Amino acid sequence: MDPSETLASRRDRAFHLHPSSNLAALRTEGPLVIVRGDGVHVIDEAGNRYLEGMAGLWCAGLGFSERRLAEAAYRQMLELPFYHAFSNKVAAVSAELAERIVGVAPAGLSRVFFANSGSEANDSAVKLAWYLSNAVGRPEKKKIISRRRAYHGVTVASGSLTGLPFAHGDWDLPAPRFLHTETPHHWRYAKPGESEEAYAERLAAELERLILAEGPDTVAAFFAEPVMGAGGVIVPPATYFERVQRVLTKYEVLMVADEVICGFGRTGQMFGSQTFGIRPDVLTCAKMMTSGYVPMSAMLVGDGIYRTLEQQSEKLGVFGHGFTYSGHPVAAAVGLETLRIYEERDLLAHVRRVAPVLQEGLRALADHPLVGEARGIGLIGAWELAKDRDRRESFDPKAGVGAQVVKNAQKRGAIVRVLPGDIIAFSPPLIIEAHELRELLARAEAALDETW
Ligand code: PLP
């Protein structure tokens, strides 16, 4: 045993089964034990400060020390720590949050179903699509299409939606009924000389071909993140969603926007759907809804879907889906306070003001010898590393080049994340100031240089 190892680290190694981690590597390195937050920084047990360039897991929009959220949780715990929303009961604060969310949601979404995680919200949306098809007498309309490299979660249904090998493989996913179509990444997948418009058109045609091959009467829903997050921070071509949406409308396929990362300001508007002109039938969100301080997620639908659900309740006696913690009052209080802070501080205007610092800073290193492409929008971005930029050739995954960049950044007090394909992701707290963004970029650049 390493005598310098701390108690927290020893406990972690002995008793904790880590989510989404390399368990074998944990035998010899890590964990990084974080004990405190301070604005856009987190502090480890040795007192080292890190500029948190990922807002944790794309979620701590208001940073790591917003007292108002802690106080809102405390007040709610004293007043009503738990109540549920089953059997036509509700905590007042949950109803208030539902109203507030509808007030900022994309046009046409008018009802909020609460859950606890992004995976649960997406599972709910899958079940909803199946339930609706049965309700309208089209029981064969059940297939679900998402995209390769999408990340929608890890439960059986949301993990099936996810289009990344690590979520499938030995987990026996995707389950039947789940299909995947192309990833809208122009730099990596476009044909030589193909414009973004032509590429978007080709992808929409590809989607249409898949729907026709399966039979339009068998396809219920299409799931998409406005900007793909964990699959590589992939910003679609400008006309992509407009074209995709046309295909979906033609074949009566529901458009489900997974706004778990993009929702609540990440792309510079409240929702990514607004940034990209998506008209979702169903929208899922989580993470920055409570700034990540307590778990909460939601699924939003419009009046048409809601009326069908009401009619089903007349027939069946119940909407048979819900969680103990759906609309948990403490989470709802934190969510409400989060949205109040957004409004009072005009956080969306702040994001739009500082976003160019991140975007221009990332692109300034587009010709770094390790970088294949620099990309992003709003306060989300990435460097995709490449062995040969012009040939779009990646490094051997076993070489761990991206992981080395992340390690070198961490040594310099900056937390960024490596995604499959040696993609270095940035998704800082939305409250980050321009000088902090410059510092984050400077530390990341030094990490690239050291790795090179
Ligand atoms: N959808 C997207 C776009 C996500 O990025 C994530 C998580 O990162 C999820 C769904 C799953 O959310 P959770 O981890 O809360 O289940």
Image (cartoon, helix red, strand yellow):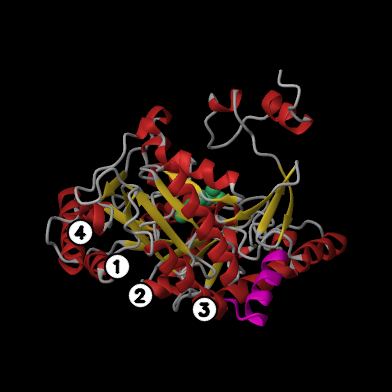
Image side of residue 336 versus residue 412, left or right: right
The residue to which callout 3 is attached is 353
The residue to which callout 2 is attached is 277
Q: Position of residue 285 (x, y in %)?
A: 52, 61
Q: Position of residue 7 (x, y in %)?
A: 78, 30
Q: Which of marks 3 and 1 is nearer the N terminus?
A: 1
Toward the top, the furthest residue is 1
State which region is magenta.
334-347
Q: Could you tell me the amino acid type at mark 3? A: Arg
Q: How far, Cα to Cα, is label 4 from label 3?
A: 33 Å
Say if mark 1 contacts mark 2, CB within 8 Å.
Answer: yes
The residue to which callout 4 is attached is 203
In front: 242, or 420?
Answer: 420
Toward the left, the furthest residue is 193
Neighbour tally class for label 3: few under 14, some 14-19, many 20 plus, Cα within 10 Å: some
Q: Could you tell me the amino acid type at mark 4? A: Leu
Find residue 138 and report its image quarter: bottom left
